[in-house]
Image (cartoon, rainbow, N blue to C red):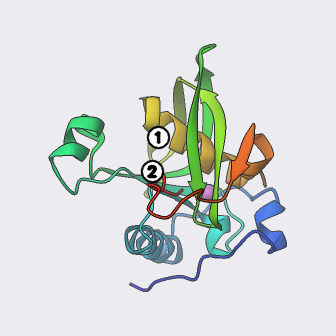
């Protein structure tokens, strides 16, 4: 496994529409392993393949499982690594919720973004088998953020407000 460099906002790859994953071969398995390692090392809660300069429809999502607080907050999703190829939101709640986001590709900038409170995501897992997940709250937010990356959309495009940390020690949102 290897850590992959995460590209930043000025790189045009982040603005491209990523292509569908069609081959679940060894090369893809290596990419998935490297993306998971890169995500955990960053650390972040989500990573899309375009962020490591691979313009393919592949995302990795993992909410942390570092302590009791994480487990209380994320429940059964804490520490679970979701790998989804060709993810698609097939259902989204009308209800929107506002929350603070950061992005591994836009270091040092945070924003307030409205997202669907609940979504159903379908796609394929790393072996190409059907994937389906109902996600709510923070997990739903991370999925929406990552799927946006596959369409060249950054959270700053959707944010009602974007800011740099206002004061020293202000808690950073987890980045995706
Ligand atoms: Co991001």
**Of residues 88 and 47, which is closer to you in this image?**
47
Check contact, mark 1 vs mark 2: CB within 8 A.
yes
Which of the 4 quarters of the picture holds residue 143?
Answer: top right
Disc marking residue 130 = 1
Ligand 1 found in image quarter: bottom right
Is residue 175 visible in this depiction of the protein? yes
The percent position of residue 132, horizontal first and vertical second, equals 45, 34
Q: CA distance from mark 1 to mark 2?
A: 6 Å
Q: Is residue 49 above or below residue 98?
A: below
Give the secondary structure at mark 2.
loop
* Residue 150 versus residue 139 in the image, above or below: below
The residue drawn where x is 53% and y is 23% is: 117
Residue closest to the far left:
68
Is the N terminus in the top left, top right, bottom left or bottom right quadrant? bottom left
Q: Is residue 83 left or right of residue 91?
A: left
* Element assignment for label 1: strand
Residue furthest top in the image: 94
Q: Residue at x 51, y 74 (%)?
A: 31
The answer to whether mark 2 is within 8 Å of ligand 1 is no
Q: Which residue is mark 2?
A: 125
Q: Position of residue 122 (x, y in %)?
A: 53, 35
**Label annotation for residue 151:** none
Note whether 78 is above or below 76 in the view shown: below
Residue closer to the observer: 114 or 143: 114
Would residue 116 appear left or right of 84 to someone viewing this image?
Answer: right
Where does the image place residue 138, in percent across and percent down from the top left? 45, 37
Q: Is residue 155 visible?
A: no
Q: Quadrant of residue 51?
A: bottom right
């Amino acid at each position: 496994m290897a850590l992959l460099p995460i590209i930043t906002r000025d790189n045009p790859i982040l603005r491209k529409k990523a292509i569908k994953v069609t081959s679940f071969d060894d090369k893809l398995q290596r990419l998935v392993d490297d993306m998971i390692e890169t995500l955990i090392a960053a650390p972040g809660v989500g990573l899309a393949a375009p962020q490591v300069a691979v313009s393919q429809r592949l995302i990795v999502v993992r909410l942390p499982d570092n302590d009791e607080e994480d487990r209380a907050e994320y429940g059964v999703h804490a520490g679970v690594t979701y790998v989804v190829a060709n993810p698609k939101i097939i259902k989204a709640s009308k209800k929107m919720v506002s929350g603070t986001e950061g992005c591994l590709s836009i270091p040092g900038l945070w924003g307030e973004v409205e997202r669907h409170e609940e979504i159903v995501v379908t796609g394929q897992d790393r072996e190409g088998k059907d994937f389906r997940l109902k996600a709510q709250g923070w997990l739903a937010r991370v999925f929406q953020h990552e799927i946006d990356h596959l369409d060249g959309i950054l959270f700053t495009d959707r944010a009602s407000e974007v800011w740099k940390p206002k004061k020293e020690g202000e808690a950073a949102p987890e980045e995706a």
